[in-house]
Amino acid sequence: MKFFVDTADVDAIRELNDLGLVDGVTTNPSLIAKSGRDILEVTKEICDMVDGPVSAEVVATEYEAMIEEGRKLAEIAPNIAIKVPLTLDGLRACKTFTSEGQMVNVTLCFSANQALLAAKAGATFISPFVGRLDDLNIDGLELIADIRQIYDNYGYETQILAASIRSANHMSDCAKIGADVATAPPAVIKGMANHVLTDKGLAAFLSDAEKAGIKIV
């Protein structure tokens, strides 16, 4: 499973990228606003930093305006994935961008039917929101499984990009179900390394090494 980091914080992206844990980046207007920077400027910096896809989202809701914004975003770098909402206008824009050879991330997916439409429109990525469904007492992971089954049934090449990831458990669960990608905040990705027994074992090893006077150099 590929790891995308869900942030516009370039320092956080750089840290994870240096660890080899970044296959791509997802941004949205809320994350850009939180960064306090110009969308074109920060997106260009991110694209220059990572080799994989960088999702940059349009803010328009009507087809013609989406096309204008998406083409502007695509000029930033070749690894831009234009992000559009899962609406009829968004699906139409997806089809247009795909026909022009652009990567497209269709976002705000909350049902298997929506995911099927995105695949039919030629989306590169479909972004089902796990955490937001969980917030409504609906099993977000079940949606990932349903989309996986449908795509496998018919050979759709659209990649399942599990989004709205809230925990390290979400990451491993998505991997077990067969999500192609999971995008998560930096803290969640870094938290995957944590385990109380690792900490306990390391402390014991270091204590024993000190008692025995072990030094490597």
Image (spheres, rainbow, N blue to C red):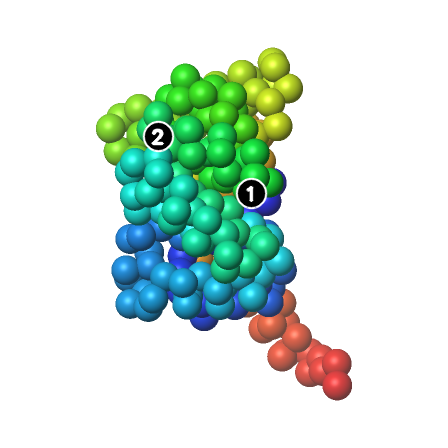
Q: Amino acid at mark 2?
A: Asp
- The spot of residue 76 in percent (x, y) is 50, 60
Task: Please tell me which residue is depicted at 71% across the width and 80% down the height of the picture.
Answer: 214
**What's the mark number on residue 102?**
1
Could you classify mark 1 by the number of other residues whose Cα lies within 10 Å: few (under 14), some (14-19), or many (20 or more)?
many
- Examine the rendered structure and indicate whether residue 122 appears above or below residue 100: above
- Examine the rendered structure and indicate whether residue 17 appears above or below residue 87: below
Q: Earlier in the sequence, mark 1 or mark 2?
A: 2
Task: Please tell me which residue is depicted at 30% across the width and 47% down the height of the picture.
Answer: 59
**What's the mark number on residue 94?**
none
Label 1's element? Answer: loop
Q: Which residue is mark 2?
A: 89
- In the rendered structure, the answer to whether residue 133 lies left or right of residue 206 reads left
- Image quadrant holding the C terminus, namely bottom right
Task: Please tell me which residue is depicted at 28% across the width and 61% down the height of the picture.
Answer: 34
- The spot of residue 167 in percent (x, y) is 40, 45
The residue lying toward the viewer, choosing from 100 and 201, is 100
- The spot of residue 168 in percent (x, y) is 45, 45
Q: Amino acid at mark 1?
A: Gln
Task: Please tell me which residue is depicted at 50% across the width and 52% down the height of the picture.
Answer: 74
Q: Quadrant of residue 90?
A: top left
Question: Cβ–Cβ below 8 Å for labels 1 and 2?
Answer: no
